[in-house]
Image (spheres, grey):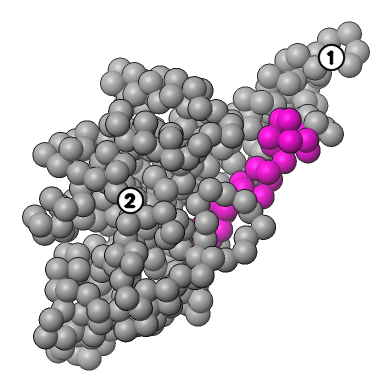
């Protein structure tokens, strides 16, 4: 992996940044999503034969980061093209690819992702949503919680568990559940954080699905699941870095122009040094994100898993610090609607919590990278 971005990546970054500037804060999600799709940005990671750009996570993460830096992030990019599109492209049948990938690539179709459950939390081994095989296909039963954008997507890729006929143990599998499937109920969760993409609790009440709703091999569910979770971590890092850059840019501009005594406040080290530190942390996290994307695109899933977790951790910490320092730099103005930073105080913490907490990442690194014994 080259530390210096290719010219192609630089051109992509510049083009997406220009699109983001045209929309900016207060953007209309549907309009931006449609335009980004028509320009090929939403499906830049998907196969060219299905209407995508033929690139990978390296390119898709650039798109989300630059939109976030412009103040108009598209959270659904983490889910629809990155998780669902990647899983279908890698493991879906030819029929599933033809049905879903062109729409996911141009933005005309979208898909949510359902894994988290009320009683399982970060422990995916405790997932209780079960899939029972029938003569005509599958029957899904269970609950999911904190699932983004179910009301605005065409379907949800649900993580369920099937029973192994040989051992009787449950194993994870992935199913495409249409939004209007009978028995598929959603309830919006009242969130303090206001975002375009709402959060939902889902109930699957004996949802009947055809046999072709299963994505991939019934016996390789865990591999296929993590093929989607690693892109989720990389894209969460991109989302966090975009937000961090947006906040830092506002703070730097303010510190450069705000004058209280003889010189701008940015001339004072007590203001300048924390902003410089935030910039360093953002750049370090970006390098790890690029490493994770490169490893994933190269097909090294094991190494990509470690790097993706580290990238997500580093980007989340950099984001929280950058937003906090930006608000502090602006003082009272940092809490006004005019500057748009106060809402980021809550939003910046999302990357610390979702899709996996920083503590679980530290658990992963301690026993996977350092070889320490598990505590759970």
Please check the rendered image and state whether residue 369 is part of the magenta-colored stretch, yes or no. no
Residue 110 is labelled as: 2
Residue that carries the numbered disc 1 in the rendered image: 259
Q: CA distance from mark 1 to mark 2?
A: 47 Å
Q: Is residue 207 visible?
A: yes
Compared with 129, 372 (above or below) is above
Sequence order check, earlier mark of 1 and 2: 2
Position of residue 328 in the picture relative to residue 202 (left or right): right
Q: Quadrant of the N terminus?
A: top left
Q: Nearer the viewer, residue 369 or 108?
A: 108
Q: x, y percentage for residue 56?
A: 26, 39
Q: Residues within 10 Å of mark 1 (few under 14, many from 20)?
A: few
Q: Is residue 230 visible?
A: no
Q: x, y percentage for residue 119?
A: 50, 80
Residue drawn at point x = 22 percent, y = 33 percent: 53
Residue drawn at point x = 56 percent, y = 37 percent: 243
Residue drawn at point x = 38 percent, y = 21 percent: 15
Q: Quadrant of residue 123?
A: bottom left
In the image, which residues are magenta? 334-358
Q: Nearer the viewer, residue 295 or 47?
A: 47
Mark 1 lies on a secondary structure that is loop
Q: Nearer the viewer, mark 1 or mark 2?
A: 2
Please check the rendered image and state whether residue 352 is part of the magenta-colored stretch, yes or no. yes
Q: Residues within 10 Å of mark 2 (few under 14, many from 20)?
A: many
Question: What is the count of numbered marks?
Answer: 2
């Amino acid at each position: 992996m080259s530390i210096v971005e290719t010219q192609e990546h630089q051109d992509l970054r510049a083009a997406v940044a220009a699109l983001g500037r045209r929309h900016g804060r207060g953007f209309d999600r549907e309009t931006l999503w449609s335009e980004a799709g028509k320009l090929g940005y939403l499906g830049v990671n998907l196969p060219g034969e299905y209407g995508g750009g033929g690139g990978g996570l390296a390119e898709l993460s650039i798109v989300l980061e630059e939109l976030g830096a412009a103040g108009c992030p598209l959270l659904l990019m983490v889910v629809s093209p990155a998780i669902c599109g990647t899983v279908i492209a890698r493991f879906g049948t030819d029929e599933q690819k033809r049905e879903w990938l062109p729409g996911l690539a141009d933005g005309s179709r979208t898909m949510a992702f359902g894994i988290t459950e009320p009683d399982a939390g970060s422990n995916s081994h405790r997932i209780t949503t079960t899939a029972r095989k029938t003569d005509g296909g599958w029957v899904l039963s269970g609950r999911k919680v904190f699932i983004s954008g179910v009301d605005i997507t065409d379907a949800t890729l649900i993580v369920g568990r099937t029973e192994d006929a040989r051992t009787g143990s449950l194993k994870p599998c992935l199913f495409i559940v249409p939004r209007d499937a009978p028995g598929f109920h959603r309830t919006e969760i009242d969130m303090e954080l206001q975002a375009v993409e709402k959060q939902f609790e889902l109930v699957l009440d004996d949802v009947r699905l055809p046999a072709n709703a299963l994505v991939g091999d019934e016996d390789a569910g865990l591999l296929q699941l993590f093929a989607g979770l690693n892109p989720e971590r990389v894209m969460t890092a991109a989302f966090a870095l975009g937000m961090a850059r947006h906040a830092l840019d506002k703070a730097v501009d303010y510190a450069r122009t705000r004058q209280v005594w003889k010189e701008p406040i940015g001339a004072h080290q007590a203001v300048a040094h924390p902003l410089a530190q935030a910039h360093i942390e953002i750049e370090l996290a970006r390098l790890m994100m690029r490493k994770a994307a490169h490893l994933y695109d190269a097909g090294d899933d094991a190494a990509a898993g470690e790097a993706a977790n580290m990238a997500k951790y580093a980007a989340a910490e950099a984001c929280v610090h950058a937003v906090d320092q930006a608000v502090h730099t602006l003082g009272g103005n940092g809490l006004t609607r005019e500057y748009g930073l106060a809402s980021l105080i809550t939003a910046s913490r999302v990357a610390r919590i979702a899709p996996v907490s920083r503590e679980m990442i530290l658990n992963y690194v301690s026993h996977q990278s350092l070889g320490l014994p598990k505590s759970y």
